[in-house]
Amino acid sequence: MPGIDVDAPGSVQLLMGNEAFARGALEAGIGFTASYPGTPASEILSTLASVAKKMNFHAEWSTNEIVALEAAAGASFAGIPAISSMKQNGINVVSDFLVNLGMTGIGKGGLVVVAGDDPSAISSSNEQDSRWICKWMDMPLLEPSTAQEAKEMVKWAFDLSRELDIVCIVRETTRLAHTRGNVKLGELPKTEKKAYFADTWNMCNPTKSKFTAGSFGILHYQLQQKLAKAPAIFEASLFNYYVGPDKPELLIITSGVCQLFSREAVEELKLQDRVGIFRLATSWPLPEKLVEKQLSRAQKVLFVEEINPFIEGSVMELAASFPASKPHIDFYGKRTGHISLFGEQNTDLVISAIAKIMGATYQARDAEYQKGIEEAAKMVPPRSINFCAGCPHRGTYWAVKDALTLDGRNGLATGDIGCYSMGFVAGGFFQERAMHCMGAGIGVANGLGNLKQFGFTQPVIAMAGDSTFYHACIPALINSVYNEANFIFLILDNSATAMTGFQPHPGVGKGATGEQAPVVDMDALCRSLGAKVEVCDPFDLKNTTETLVRLMADEEPGAKVVIMRRVCELVRARREKAPYKMHVDPDKCAGDDCGCKRLCIRLFACPGLMWDKEAGKAKIDEALCTGCGLCTDICPQGAIIKEAV
Amino acid sequence: MKTLTKEPLNVIIGGVGGQGNVLMAFLLGGALVNKGYFTGVCDTYGTSQRGGPVASHVRISKNRQYGPLISSGHAGVILALEPVEALRLLNQFGSQDTIVITNSRPVYSSDVSSGKATYPEMDELLQAIEKFSAKLTVIDATDAALKMGGSIYTNIIMIGALIGADLLPVDKESIVEVLSERFHGTVLDNNIKALDKGIELVRQ
């Protein structure tokens, strides 16, 4: 495939939704982009960063989402078009800045935020409908359905943003973000951009600059006035359209990928002559006249959307204002249970909602096949999530488990967001016993670590990855020193934001576009805050366990930082050959007579180890083993042998 | 543009995270778009990067862009890098009309290695797939790949098998075109050899 910057207007490319968002930003002539990695939105910034140097614009992985948005806003204040993309949790992180940005406006550059929601929390700690931020903060919202629309709507969002002097939010969900589709390319602008901070006067703002939010209620009124111009623009948009008979029995109102599910559902049920679909791409603020016109088509309306009843609520609110002389409408959706209040939608779910309302019957497969295949599929074994073969986190959690057991006071680990979140499943020996948002592991430990007066003696180990440390842990670490909270803070430094695709961060010496970057020294930073700092190798199980046991007995207040330092195994394996050739000595492995009950594969459970049924002994799976050598130290018989390569 | 055997034609490429099925779907999608078809490629996976079930939904149409996910019973073709994954996908998306092409080499999950779950007997597994599909073709792709120099070629051999089965409007040349935008020199040559191997194996 040619690069995302290919200058071939009219040509059709296969682009992932996120790549299409990036292409839209290029066609809108952006000069600045900043983001923090988070599924499903990560590829927008990485795609842009891949061409940033060549196309002479700025692209950065910021330390966190609020810094990213603030940086992007700064560019916009100076007249440079800017885009910031983030997952749903990022929307929460930026909310404090965003609400103030609404008050001041965004300057001449134009500022677009892409909010990536993850229905069903496929790669998230939670699912959340980010669209509420638009209602809450008076900002316009666009919801594309396909990669092509993603590209077009980003461009349009920049126009809206500049025209209304407002942040425009474009929402994607995982299935749009990660689906490739046909995209017809447009022109790439070749205009020179010049940055200059021009703080124009605002008659409603008593300060000298329009970019100062303050206790002036009139600024909120002014924002509402800006937003009030949006519906008229939305009324005329071709992105909002109706497909179906003039007077359908059932009208579906839908947005995003749900539009595609709805269309297929109607076709599957062969109800095209009886059911119509109104696709509302501009879901906030509502283009009320258009919605009213569509509602007049039918007396039954079904809302299909992910995750919350966002459009459903807005449209029903509007309908409540209709005069009593209008015909009554029965509304169906999440309120009535026809569409679930949580999780992803799909064609099958929409089929069952429509069938229920229309009294239709539908069977995807004949009953006999359905019964037979379900029975046959019982032989399909599960594939539980686990750390990769050779993952340093396995060593860390093994040592944490051993240390907490040796300490004997029912201590616990509080976790955070990253690969190591899997500490709450068997792969991490169920050690992680609290897990919420970025930075919450050490935040929660600040509370647990200050309960001595209530007789609390359980040792607390807060855990965070290196990228998470820079993102969200530093204020909590300062707090632990200042407020003398007693706990151990493990930083799992694997030199990568591994979970989301190895994006660089302030500790790795590389920037978003691949260039060398200064390193923010994690060890020195922690020491400068007044914390005790030690460094351990997660593959040195003995030293790590002893260190943790010693620190758990340390009654001195303040967080004790232990940096668990070893590069992500996937990163290492790309750079160099395996350090060890592994094998199990069949004479030493006692099999089921050992008494360890297959410790290495049952508990340690590295994918590189397997059970040889015929021999009744453990065995190395050569296809998966990365030769890290860690398992040598866990076998009670010393049967797992590592030979240096 | 050739007329499709079904409109839309739905293909699911399944395997285990790390086996390279995302690249397969990308190559197939690229070739189809170059031929003028509307193509959707949706990669679905859980939280695990490696070792979890991964499936790419490929939706091909002459008329329009279809939604990201194939609905129950609507998989036209299942191309599996791992036999248990073929049955898993058949259960979710298959019907008596589904054509299945699967690699023969099992990949054991940690649940299986640790003894918490059992991997089915191969004969029983393949019989079930055959019974609940229109046609089953088993390809010893991993074995062939290892003979070529590494299991890394398994996915390209399987793409070769899909092309060789003449189920899609894609020929070898159109895949090579997309491959050569991404790979060069010996790597490209080896991938073309893998493609040929897959075509040969499926036609035996």
Image: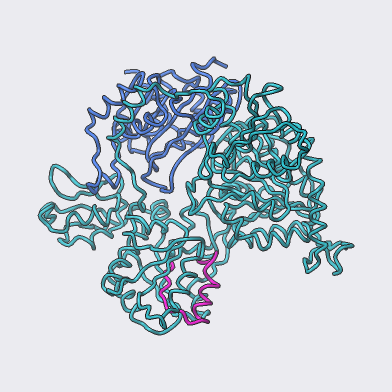
Chain colours: A cyan, B blue
Q: For residue A522: magenta?
A: no
Choose top left, top right, bottom left or bottom right for residue A506.
bottom right
Q: Position of residue A433 (x, y in %)?
A: 38, 63
| Above/below status of B88 relative to A408 | above
Give the tally of numbered discs. Answer: 0
Choose top left, top right, bottom left or bottom right for residue A547.
bottom left
| Above/below status of B194 relative to A485 | above
Q: Position of residue A109 (x, y in %)?
A: 78, 53
Q: Which residue is drawn at 33% across and 38% down?
A: B150
Whether residue A333 is visible: yes
Q: Residue at x 44, y 42 (%)?
A: B45
Q: Is A59 left or right of A540, judged from the image as shown?
A: right
Q: Is A24 left or right of B46, judged from the image as shown?
A: right
Q: Nearer the viewer, residue A333 or A614?
A: A333
Q: Is A524 left or right of A578, judged from the image as shown?
A: right
Q: Which of A142 and B179 is in front in this view?
A: A142
In which quadrant is the N terminus of chain A drawn? top right
Q: Residue at x 32, y 37 (%)?
A: B149
Our reading of the magenta stretch's main secondary structure is helix
Whether residue B197 is visible: no
Q: Position of residue A332 (x, y in %)?
A: 60, 36
| Above/below status of A293 relative to A612 | above
Residue range corresponding to the magenta coloring: A469-491
Q: Where is residue A441 in the image (x, y as percent from the top left)?
A: 46, 66
Q: Which residue lies furthest to the right in this view?
A: A203
In which quadrant is the C terminus of chain A drawn? bottom left
Choose top left, top right, bottom left or bottom right for residue A202.
bottom right
